[in-house]
Image (tube, grey):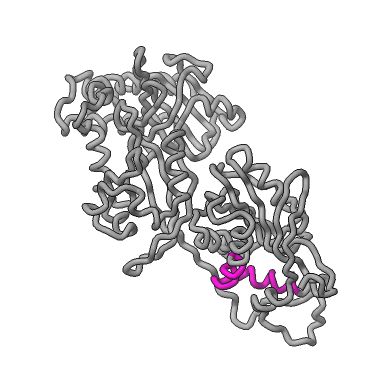
Amino acid sequence: AKNAQQGFSDCAPVATSHDEREQVSKALSRLCKMAAAVMDADRATLWLWQAGVTRKIASHGCDIPFRSLNWDFDAVDYQPDQRVVIAHALKDVEREAQVTTGSERPVAFLCRVPVAVAPNYVASLIIFAETPRASPPPGELHIVNEIAALMKCEFDRIKQVLLERPNSGKVPALERQLFEKVMSSSNRVFLLDAKLVIRAVSDNAASILGDTPGSLVGRPYLDWESVLGISVAYFLKHSLMQGTCTSDLEVDFPARNGIPGAWTLRATPVTPSDTEERYLYVSIQALFDSIPAPPTGRPLCRSSYDAGSIPLLQPTADLLFSTLVQRRSIRARDGVNYLSIRSWRQPIREFQIAALKALKNNPGAEFPNRIAEEFAGEIKSLLGMTTFNVVVPISCGHSKGAKCLSVEIARALGKQLNIPVVQAFARQSLPGSSHPKQNLKRPPLQLKSPVRGNVLLVDDVASSGEHLVEAANLLRPHCGTVFPVAWIGGDAADDGSHD
C-alpha cells in the first residue's frame, strides 16, 4: 500500500487546469491497473453513478472512454457503501449482472469496492476477470481498500468537473475531452449525438465514410443513411434509448481507393458528463475473410455411389440449381413455422448432397449470391422489402474452410435487402462431414449476441427444421419477429409435378 502511494498526491487541491485534470485521470487509470494486478484480474474500472446512469471515468483494460449504461441501486440487494466479492460469477449470473461491470465479455470473478458515496452520486471500483478464482485473502482486500482510498483523493480533485452539468451554449470539459480522444484516435471510430449527428470522427473512420473529418462533423445521419442503411439507424436509436451496446453489425460501405467495403460496426453508449445527453461511440473493423483453396488435383466430390471407376467431375452450382426442385413450402415444427424454397430430388438426393458438400468447402461469391437472390425474391413477394431489420445466419459446424455457406448467404442477402447481418450464434467445430443426418447430432446452439428488431433467420439446409426452431426460440425473448427460412427442405418425388 505504501508503494502504491508513490507518485500520487495525498488529497491535493482541486485540479483546475486541463493539464491537472489529465494528470488526475492518468493517476486514476494507474490505480485501476494496480487494483487489477493485486487481484490477478484482467480489468478494473472506476464507475460513477448518478440518477440512474453509471459511466466509466477511469479504467485498465477497457478502451472505450466514458462507457455508460442505465443502471440503479434499486435493482440490487446491496447498499452503495457495501463491498461485494463474487469468486465464481458464472455460477451466480443474476448477482453478477446486478453488480454491473459494463463488460461485453464473460465475467467469472468480480470484486466491487466503494470509493466515494454521497446522496446524489456513488463512485465504485469494479475489478473483474474472465476466469474464476478463489476468494481474495484479507491481505489483498486490505491493499485494494487502500487503493480505493487513494482513488477517493484523486476523485475529489476532479469531482467538480465530473459532476458538472452543461450550461446553455457551453460544452462541458469532459465532453470536449471525449471529442478530442475520438478525433486523435488511430482507430476507425466516430461519435454520434442523440440525434445521430456526427460530432467527432477519426481520420481513419472518415476515409471509410468517404469524406474529410471537417466535412463529416455536423452532418446528420439522414445524409449518409444510404451508406449504412435505414435498419442500422434502428439499432443505433435502440442503443441510445436502452443504454446498451449494439451487436456486431456487418455492413457494406462503398469501396474507395482500394479500401474494401465489408466492415463490422459496433456502437457503445457513452456519457462524459452529468447530463441526459448520451453519445454513441461507434467503432468500425474490417471484416476479413480468407478461404484456403482446395489442394491441386484433389477431387471435391465423391458420391457414395462411386465405385472408383467413374471419372470424378467438379460439381458446379448449376448442377444444384438445375436439379433441386423449386417448391416454396411453409413447414411447421414445435410451434414454429419456417419457409423452405427448394427440395431435394429424391432419386438423385445423395448426388445433390455430395455436390453441396463440395461447394460448401469453397462456396466463392456467385453461389451464395444466387441463393440470396432466391431468398430475396420470396421475401419481397411474401412480406415486402422493409419488414426486417437484420439477417441472422445459423452457425456452421462442419464447414472446414473459413467461410460458412449460411453466413455467406446471409451477407449476400443483407446487401440485397440493405440490412445488416449479425452472427448471433457461436460457431461450432464439429467432427465428420456436413450431411443432413450428421446435422441432427449437433450440440445445442449457443446465443452469443442477443438481437433486437425483426429478424430474418437464414440457413442453407433444414433437414428436419430442428435447428431453425431452436435458433428461433433462442432469439425470440430478445427481439420482435423471427422469420426462419431455409434454401433446401425436404424431398420431392421425381414426377415432374413440382418443376
Does the magenta segment cover residue 350?
no
Q: How many dots with numbers? A: 0
Give left or right: position of 90 versus 180.
right
Residue at the left extreme, as displayed: 17
Does residue 73 appear anywhere in the picture? yes
Q: Is residue 38 above or below residue 314?
A: above
To which quarter of the image does residue 328 belong? Answer: bottom right
Quarter of the image that includes the N terminus: top left
User: What residue sits 38% from the left and 35% below the top?
Assistant: 67
Foreground of the two, 69 or 153: 69
Foreground of the two, 345 or 450: 345
x%, y% of residue 432?
72, 62
Q: Is residue 408 above or below residue 243?
A: below
User: What residue sits 42% from the left and 14% below the top?
Assistant: 81
User: What residue sits 16% from the left and 33% below the top?
Assistant: 19
x%, y% of residue 71?
45, 25
x%, y% of residue 362?
59, 71
To which quarter of the image does residue 175 belong? Answer: top left
User: What residue sits 59% from the left and 62% below the top?
Assistant: 376
Q: Is residue 143 above or below residue 56?
A: above
The residue range painted magenta reads 352-372
Does the magenta segment cover residue 362?
yes
x%, y% of residue 162?
27, 25
Does residue 404 appear anywhere in the picture? no
To which quarter of the image does residue 327 belong? Answer: bottom right
* Majority SS type along the magenta span: helix
Quarter of the image that includes the C terminus: bottom right
